[in-house]
Amino acid sequence: MPVHAPRSSTELFPEALRLSPKQREVLNVLQEYPQGARAADIAKDMDMHVNTARGHLDELVHVGAVRVITAPAKGRGRPSLIFQVRIPDNRSVAEEYVTLISVLAEMLADKEELNDYASEQARAIGRKWATSTHQDQFPSANALTPLYRKMRDMGFDPTASATELEEKGQTDMELHACPFVAAGIKPSPFVCAIHDGFLEQTAADSGEHLSLTLVPKSGNGTCCVNVKQTA
């Protein structure tokens, strides 16, 4: 009999579950109860009828955002149903993975290489990372669009000028956030080199439409990707 791994935590993110505004509101209230709460508790907190609260909670159970367990009965009354949130805290998940990446980098590289942005090992990891992820197509007419979308979805908060790329053949994409920064942890040059390797492979996968060069900590709290149109 095959042994299956647990489901991906990303399947439990609210974005993946497509919750309604009211469902998100109920979920936020329920998250204040680490051990779970009764429908009556949620109804009281949200100033709504208990049947209305139970209806929203049942919807959340149906989509997999909440589980329901039966609390031990006290006395002769019916046992209470306890609703518990299954949704992880996205920020906590991100910070834990950033910590893990930092630890892995320190174990993979000695102190000298950890501070070496020219590390070939780091770039090889970045290239492997890029080939292991889904890459959007890079049409020659507007190659900047899929790159912009990729950087945005990865959490780099990019800004770039498509017009400048069209007119001059090159532009700078400024990255105003970094998914490798969290809870006071800043990426080492080794980790930045991994990102540069990722961009190098992404450029190769673009059908040679783009040349991409990362400039870490380029100023004003940003990093920069120099984007050149090559074809």
Image (tube, helix red, strand yellow):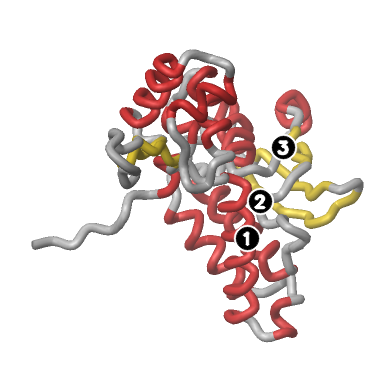
Q: Residues within 10 Å of mark 2 (few under 14, many from 20)?
A: some
Looking at the image, tell me whether mark 3 or mark 2 is earlier in sequence order.
Answer: 3
Q: Quadrant of the N terminus?
A: bottom left
Q: Which residue is mark 2?
A: 179
Q: Secondary structure at mark 3?
A: strand
Which residue type does callout 1 highlight? Val
The Cα atoms of the two marked residues, 2 and 1, are separated by 7 Å
Horizontal side, residue 35 vs residue 47: left or right: left
Q: Which residue is mark 1?
A: 98
Looking at the image, tell me whether mark 3 or mark 1 is earlier in sequence order.
Answer: 1
Looking at the image, tell me whether mark 2 or mark 1 is earlier in sequence order.
Answer: 1
Q: Are marks 2 and 1 in contact (CB under 8 Å)?
A: yes
Residue 158's tag is 3
Which residue type does callout 2 highlight? Pro
Image point 53% across, 51% down: which residue? 204
**Please, is residue 140 above or below residue 129 in the view?**
above
Q: Residue furthest front?
A: 75
Residue closer to the observer: 184 or 174:
184
**Please, is residue 218 above or below residue 102 in the view?**
above
